[in-house]
Image (tube, rainbow, N blue to C red):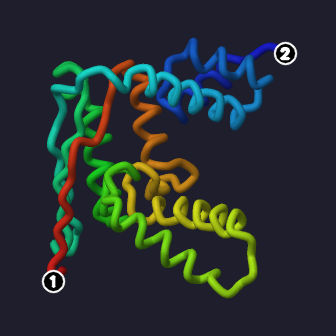
């Protein structure tokens, strides 16, 4: 089946990834755009893992102040080169991450940043809910792991559904950027301020 230039153009516009990669993904997906996006996302994650060990000594500090002036965010997003840090798309990425933080109020960047005592407390709460349920211990542990996944989505920035497109997580947004610019990109730190909190 031949892939048309129009299909490639549409996929490129939706993902921001290069024409040749879009064409290959469409060919692999048999012309199905949604499958091609999934293929590109998986490749993006693979590339992100390959680049994760590379130093990120450049980047930007971005800000977002909500229109009512009662919520403000500072976020540091790091990349490898000044060339990428000065790129308009990188600046847009930083701004969008700051806006996401204002809206979604994460407490940590990733699950590895959650203090062990808080994680254990969360597990104990879930186990306590099933104390009298007669369920086998291994079933309760599976439930605990499932609930932890939900907990991560609530409190971890990288695990949260992205506010501008809830079909992807913030980590997918970063992986797509890494795939496009071929540089390790990560969130260094953030602070969210809200009047009265």
Q: Image point 61% across, 62% down: which residue?
A: 146
* Residue 86 appears in the rendering: no
Quadrant for residue 186, please give it. top left
Q: Regarding mark 1 in the picture, which secondary structure is present there?
A: loop
33 or 120, nearer to the observer: 120
Q: Image point 52% across, 25% down: which residue?
A: 46
| Quadrant including the C terminus | bottom left
Residue 43: numbered disc: none
* Residue 133 appears in the rendering: yes
Residue 196: numbered disc: 1
Q: Image point 53% across, 48% down: which residue?
A: 168
Mark 1 or mark 2, whichever is nearer to me: 1
Q: Regarding mark 2 in the picture, which secondary structure is present there?
A: loop
174 or 69, nearer to the observer: 174
For disc 1, the neighbor class at 10 Å (few under 14, some 14 to 19, many from 20) is few
Q: CA distance from mark 1 to mark 2?
A: 60 Å
Which badge, 1 or 2, is on the more N-terminal residue? 2
Lateral position of residue 159 relative to residue 71, left or right: right
Residue 175: percent from left, percent from top: 45, 33
Q: Which residue is mark 2?
A: 1
> In the rendered structure, are the residues bearing label 1 and label 2 in contact, judged by CB atoms less than 8 Å apart?
no
Residue 80: percent from left, percent from top: 24, 22
For disc 2, the neighbor class at 10 Å (few under 14, some 14 to 19, many from 20) is few
Lateral position of residue 173 relative to residue 24, left or right: left
Lateral position of residue 86 relative to residue 93, left or right: left
Placement of 173 over or under 141, stated as above or below: above
Residue 191: percent from left, percent from top: 18, 59
């Amino acid at each position: 089946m031949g892939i048309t230039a129009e299909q490639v153009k549409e996929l490129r516009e939706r993902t921001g990834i290069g024409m040749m990669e879009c064409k290959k993904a469409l060919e692999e997906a048999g012309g199905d755009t949604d499958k091609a996006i999934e293929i590109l996302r998986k490749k993006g994650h693979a590339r992100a893992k390959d680049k994760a060990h590379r130093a990120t000594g450049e980047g930007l500090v971005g800000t977002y102040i909500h229109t009512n002036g009662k919520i403000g965010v500072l976020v540091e997003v790091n990349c490898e080169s000044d060339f990428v840090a000065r790129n308009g798309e990188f600046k847009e990425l930083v701004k969008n991450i700051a806006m996401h933080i204002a809206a979604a109020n994460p407490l940590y960047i990733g699950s590895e940043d959650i203090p062990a005592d808080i994680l254990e407390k969360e597990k104990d709460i879930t186990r306590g809910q099933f104390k009298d349920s007669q369920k086998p211990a291994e079933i309760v542990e599976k439930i605990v792991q499932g609930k932890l996944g939900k907990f991560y989505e609530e409190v971890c920035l990288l695990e949260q559904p992205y506010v501008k497109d809830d079909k992807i997580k913030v980590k997918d947004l970063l992986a797509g950027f890494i795939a496009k610019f071929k540089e390790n990109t990560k969130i260094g730190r953030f602070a969210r301020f809200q009047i009265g909190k």
